[in-house]
Every structure is written in structure tokens, then in C-alpha cells.
Amino acid sequence: MDVIRIEGLSKYYRHQLTGRKIHALEGLNLNVGQGETFGFLGPNGAGKTTTIKLLLGLLFPSSGKAWLFDKPYTDIRVKQDIGFLPENPYFYDYLKGEEILYFIGKLYGMNSVDLKKRIDYLLENVGLSQARHLPLHKYSKGMLQRIGLAQAVIHKPKLVILDEPLTGLDPIGRKEIRDFIFTLKDEGSTIFFSTHILSDAEMICDRVAILMKGKLAKTGKMTELLSPKVKTYEIVAANLTEEGKRALKQVSTRFVDEGTQVAASIEDESKVQTVMELIQKDKARLISLIPQRESLEEIFIQEVKGK
Amino acid sequence: MLGRILAIATNTFREAIRNKILYILLAFAMVLIIFSIVMSALSIGQDEKIIKDVGLFAITFFGVLIAIMVGIGLIYNELDKRTIYVIVSKPLHRYEFVLGKFFGLVMTILVNVGIMSAVYLALLAVKGYSIPFVLIEAILMTVMELVVVTALATLFSSFSTPILSAVYTFMLYIAGKLTDDLIRFASQMMTEKAYDPVTVADKLMAKTAISISWILPQLEKFNIRNQAVNGIPITDSLMMNTLYGLLYTGCILFIASVCFSKRNFK
């Protein structure tokens, strides 16, 4: 069963003056399986938030269909199994931390006894126990993000949708949110989150989709996207003879001689074997041989540039 | 469904009672009710009538102000502050949200009218004036009038900005106060007179006036304040007028729900 299935989803707006169509999302096809942690990547304005808003019924699509848990996304019953953290979450700032969680829990039809226990657990878990009686207008950005996560999972949803959950946070805040996402992952939740912080996506996601100008540019498992492309092999060796150094320099794209040690970059995989034989022949010492894979960031930038 | 509407209503009530403007209006209402003692001292032999009249006026006037001032931002503020994203993504129908917001404001108005009425009735009791049941009926009918005004404010708030909503609601309130005159005008047009026979144009105009009076809220149906203060018998059926108020409110909330259901939240 797909937790999210999107077929040809499009959303366009009309320019207020010219009436020209502005495509926010164009013919998106996407599937997210159960238990997956799915990263939805793209630069600002790519259509990530539009997609999330369409799935949650905040926007109406211009065309296309979507299913959540194999039911049409318009069926409000499916929302019972979804938790959502919007980008820069805005809550009723006159409410206290525990009041907002109680209110949201009631919207999910939770009974008061279970709800109070769950609130205690979550406030403890997101480190806001001390701030439970503080009104939200006194919360910092990081605290708001954490209370946002707590409200998103108050009812133990099967699918958690997080819109830019790591944006604007300091490194500690990001780590806390990441850890929270890992906990959700361990509990078996499906996580669909949008971000443009690629290092986090690389760390957290099983699979990603890259969205560009409203269109799906690339999708795949992290291992598929990252592993096939070894860009260079970084070799560090010691005690090479002058002749050996010269031979290594000839096959390298980058060569640094630091006396006893040399560092070289080799692009051609077939030349790696030659270098290894050279080191052996010279009775030199191989210190490291690291394949440099293409990072998600580089794939992302390539897609942005339209390569 | 009821649980979700109640959750939204309770939250709206909580938001409203933390709104400073509410307390300012309530304070003004109290001052006016108590000030009626001073006004009554200036009249000759009309003390009781003036205190009763000014008190009822204060309850209505400030009740309407609260309904409009709080009601106009009711839904708009949710969009403006983006709190709507958190709410609409939850398992609730959009009409449940509209109803929740409406009932939350009605709860606020009930509490405020309750406080104003308690002060008003206590003042009458202290002064040793009679408190006939019709006076209570007049307050209850005022509540019905405020419910209709709240529904109108909710409707405009579902698709318009607070300033425009205030203008629309206030204009409809004034028009609603004049619908009785419109109906009277229509019946005069239809009255055959020797020197002025009823023409086709007269009929058309009368029918148009009647149609408009059905669209506009007939707020004078809820105004029995004059009868209550002056002891004039009430000829209208209060039950039927209340039923009209509930039906009208239902229709307005239905339109508000339809408007809100079609909105995209960018």
C-alpha cells in the first residue's frame, strides 16, 4: 500500500492583471511507501509547499488526483492518520504550550485522560516541560518548532508531513529535530518532509524527489542517487620515489607533493589499479584511498542549472 | 463532529476573552448603565423609564459593537496569522470550522450580555423598580438580534478583510433596522385608493421591496424594548420571531460555509 500516491497533480494561478497562467505545480507523479522517510527537495518556489497544501486540502488542484492510504485525499477521514507541521508554524500565540496541544488533540477526537498523558509525554520528549505554562508568544523559534512537532504527532499519526522543519534553526535545534524525526522513523511512521537543507536530507532520508519549477526533476533512493557516481578517488601515499611521484602526477587531475607524503585525485577508475601497482613497486605506503561520491548537494545544483 | 465544533468554539471564546477591546466595550456599557441614574435625575417623574430604557439600549448597542468588532476578524485573522494551516489540515470539515467560530463568538456575546444584564437588573432592584418578565424577554430577543448580527459578521469575515466586513455588517445592520419601513412601504403601494389606483409598476415595486425585505435581516422583529419599558402590549409572536431569527442565522451560516469551503489557502 502506498501511503501517498500522486498522479498528474497540477496547480496554476492566474496573474491578476494579465490573466496569464502561472504554474506552481505541473503534472506531479509521486509515490511514498509505508515506513519510508521521504525527502521532498527543491529551491524556494519549486512547488514543495504547494504539493503539501494540495495533499492536505488547503488548496484545490487545477488537475490531477492524489490518494492517501489508498483513499482519495479529499476524504477527511484520512487526515485522522496524518500529522502536519507547517513551514514557520504559526499557532494561537495567546495559548499556552499545553493548551495548544490539548486543543489540537480535541480536534482529533482524543479523550481528555489519554490526551493529558500524551501531552505530558510529548512535552517531556521535545524538552518543553518547563515551558508548558508559557504562552506561545514567549516561545523562541526553536521552541515553536518543537511544540509544532509535538502537535503534529499528538495523535500518533501513521504519516507525518513536515514542511521545512529544519529551516531557521541553529545547529543544536536542527539536531534535536533530526533526533525527533529518527524517533518517529524508529516507531514506524512514514515521514514526508520538504527541505532545502540537503545535508539533513542526506542524513535522514531513504528516498528523495527533487522538484524544479513545479516539475519533478529526479526521484530515487539515496543509494541510487548517490552511489553510482564516484567522481574522483582521493589517494594519499607516503615514501614514493621521485620517479613514482612523476608517474602519479601524470595520471592525476590534482597532485600535491608535501615531501614524504603526496595527495592525488584520480578521475578515471581504471587508473586506480595502475597507481596501486606503482605504490607497490616503489615499496611506498598507501595511507588512504577514498572514493569521492557525488553529494546530494551537487546533484541538486546540477538539476537547478538544468544540466 | 460536535466535539470538533466545541473545540473550535471554546478556543474562539478563549481568544475573544483575551481581547482587550472586549473589556473596553464592556466597561463603557457598565458606565452607561450606571450613568442612567444621573440621566434619570435630570428628568421629572420619568426616572424608572429612563433607567430601564438606557440600560436596554446599552446592552443592545454594546452587544452589537462586540459582535461586529470581534466578529469581523473572526475568520480573517486565522488566514492573516496563518493559524488556518494547522486547523484545516486536521480531520474536520470546513463548515465545522465556520460553525465553531460562530458559536465561540455567540458564547462570548452571551457572557457579555449576561454581565451587562446582571448589572442592569441589579441596578433596577437596588432602585426598587419592578422587573417585569417582559424586560427579560426584551433582553432575550436582543440576544437573538445579536446572534443574527454575529452570523452576518462571520459571513463577511469568511471572504473579506476586517474593515470591509465591518462596513458590510454595519450597513446590513442599519438596513435590517429599516426593513419594517420597507414592508410598510410595500403594503402602502398595494393599497387601492380612489385618487391613486394600483398600477403594474406599483405592484412590481411592492414585490421588489418585499423580496428585499426577505433578503435583509428583519431586525425589528427582535426589538420589543419600547414595549417592555412602556408597558405596551406585544402583538407579535415572539416564538415565531425567534424561529425566523434562527432560520435566518442558519441560512447565513450556510452561505458562509459555502464561501469558506471554496477558498484556497495560499
Image (cartoon, coloured by chain):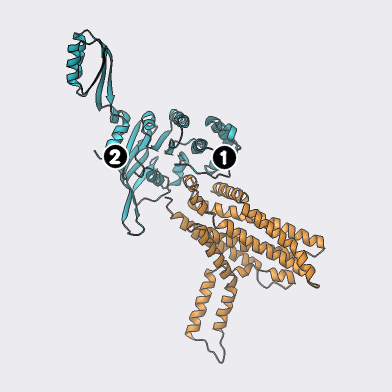
Left or right, A182 with respect to B250, comes to left
Residue drawn at x 38%, y 41% is A70
Name the residue beneath numbered marker 1. A138
A270 or A262, which lies in front?
A: A262
Q: Which residue is mark 2?
A: A304
Q: Which chain contains the residue that carries disc 2?
A: A
Q: Position of residue A255 (x, y in %)?
A: 23, 20
Secondary structure of the residue carrying numbered label 2? helix
* Mark 1 element type: helix
Figure quadrant of residue B48? bottom right
| Residue at x 54% of width, y 61% of height | B166
The residue lying toward the viewer, choosing from B266 and B23, is B23
Q: Residues within 10 Å of mark 2 (few under 14, many from 20)?
A: some
- The residues bearing labels 2 and 1 have C-alpha atoms spaced at a distance of 39 Å
Badge 1: chain ID: A
Q: Position of residue B69 (x, y in %)?
A: 58, 58
Pick out the residue farthest to the right.
B128
User: Can residue B47 be seen?
Assistant: no
Q: Residue at x 49, y 51 (%)?
A: B80
Looking at the image, is A90 positioned above or below residue A228? below
Upstream in the sequence, badge 2 or badge 1? 1
Is B23 above or below relative to A117? Answer: below
Q: Is residue B256 above or below residue B181?
A: above
Please identify which colour was used for chain A in the image: cyan
Which residue type does callout 1 highlight? Lys
| Chain B shade in the render | orange
**Residue A213: image x %, image y %?**
31, 45
